[in-house]
């Protein structure tokens, strides 16, 4: 079961600074740094659509789209579509392992 106190949108907004700080590494290495992946996992953002009985949040589709829309805007600002892509894929698959 998920045990997050804040809603997913708030947790996503809290990661804008770490994502922006990781931008040079992401661009240079063409992958997400392990520390950033851990932050995304710890924030529960890779398990938003996973059923609760599997340890996810089972977020309804409209709330999930709100998170993705917000993050799309944030990531456009820091030019990190790779983070958005990984988050979107892993949120659907529930692959919370880095």
Image: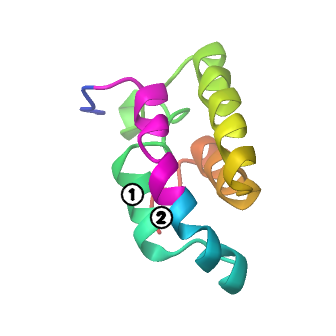
Q: Residue beneath label 2, please?
A: 37
x and y percentages locating residue 57 in the rendered image: 42, 29
- Alpha carbons under labels 1 and 2: distance apart: 5 Å
x and y percentages locating residue 54 in the rendered image: 40, 39
Residue at 36% from the left image edge and 39% from the top image edge: 55
Residue at 39% from the left image edge and 29% from the top image edge: 52
Q: Vertical placement of 78 versus 97: above or below?
A: above
Say whether marks 1 and 2 touch (CB < 8 Å): yes
Part of the protein shown in magenta: 6-19
Q: Vertical placement of 41 versus 4: above or below?
A: below
The N terminus, quarter of image? top left
x and y percentages locating residue 45 in the rendered image: 48, 43
Mark 1 residue crowding within 10 angstroms, few (<14) / some (14–19) / many (20+): some
| Residue 49 quadrant | top right
| SS category of the residue bearing label 1 | helix
Residue at 53% from the left image edge and 48% from the top image edge: 94
14 sits to left or right of 50:
left
Q: Vertical placement of 40 versus 44: above or below?
A: below
Mark 2 residue crowding within 10 angstroms, few (<14) / some (14–19) / many (20+): many
67 sits to left or right of 17:
right
| Residue 6 quadrant | top left
Q: Residue beneath label 1, please?
A: 39
């Amino acid at each position: 079961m998920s045990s997050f106190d804040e809603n997913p949108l708030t947790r996503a907004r809290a990661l804008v600074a770490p994502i922006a700080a990781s931008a040079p590494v992401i661009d240079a290495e063409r992958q997400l740094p392990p520390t950033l992946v851990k932050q995304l996992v710890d924030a529960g953002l890779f398990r938003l659509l996973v059923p609760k009985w599997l340890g996810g949040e089972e977020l309804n589709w409209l709330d999930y789209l709100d998170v993705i829309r917000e993050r799309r805007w944030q990531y456009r600002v820091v030019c990190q579509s790779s983070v958005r892509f990984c988050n979107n894929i892993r949120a659907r698959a529930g692959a919370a392992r880095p």
